[in-house]
Amino acid sequence: MQGFLTAFDELTARTGAKRSYEVGCGEGHLSMRLHDRGWQVRGSDLEDVSVAEANEQCVQRNIDPRFQTVSLFDLTTQDAAEELVICCEVLEHVPDTAKAISVLKSLASPYLLVSVPREPIWRILNVARGKYLKDLGNTPGHIQHWSSASFVSMLKSSFTIVEVRKPLPWTMILCRNDK
């Protein structure tokens, strides 16, 4: 996990941004990591429980809650456009990635940071640790699968690829929305 967080810290710093919107924020850990570095952060997730935990992290830091329950597909530029949009560990759960990428493109002004599990390494590591064997190592809920190359290929038709990182076992890509 440390490699993931190091890549996250370095790529977010590279943008020069100080404001972010996290799509699929979960419990808000990545956003709070940025907040603790002086960023203005907001975000959303599908799960009420996760959003409540993210907002509790805001309360613990004496800041107003900044997270809401909303689908990626319902986000608008008025609600969620930001100089850095973050979408980490989300797209593998999304049935319509083309539509998701379109929404993310509308929000990223100008940067998008995305990460997904790197296949087939992700599944191989799951099998090696005896997890999800009946599904050949596929994590429950993962319905999309990409190698690093295939993920880059998908994104480069919509974005300029600024940098690709491969902290084991993920692919993390910083994109610029200038196409």
Image (tube, rainbow, N blue to C red):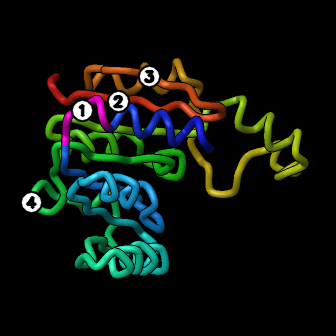
Frontmost of labels 2 and 1 is 1
Frontmost of labels 4 and 3 is 3
Find numbered disc 2 in the image and state the secondary structure of the residue it sits on.
strand
Quarter of the image with the C terminus is top left
State the mark number for residue 15: 1
State the mark number for residue 134: none
Disc 2 from disc 1: Cα separation = 9 Å
Q: Is residue 38 above or below residue 172?
A: below
Q: Amino acid at mark 3?
A: Val
Badge 2: how crowded within 10 Å, few (<14), some, or many (20+)? many
Disc 2 from disc 3: Cα separation = 7 Å
Residue 3, quarter of the rendered image: top right
Badge 3: how crowded within 10 Å, few (<14), some, or many (20+)? some
Disc 4 from disc 3: Cα separation = 29 Å
Q: Which of pointers 1 and 4 lies earlier in the amino acid sequence?
A: 1
Q: Which of pointers 4 and 3 lies earlier in the amino acid sequence?
A: 4
Disc 1 from disc 4: Cα separation = 22 Å
For the residues bearing labels 2 and 1, Cβ distance under 8 angstroms: yes
Image point (79%, 37%), residue name: 125
Q: Amino acid at mark 4?
A: Gln
State the mark number for residue 174: 2
State the mark number for residue 78: 4
Image point (47%, 68%), residue name: 27
Residue 129 vs residue 173: left or right? right
Find numbered disc 1 in the image and state the secondary structure of the residue it sits on.
helix
Residue where numbered disc 3 is placed: 164
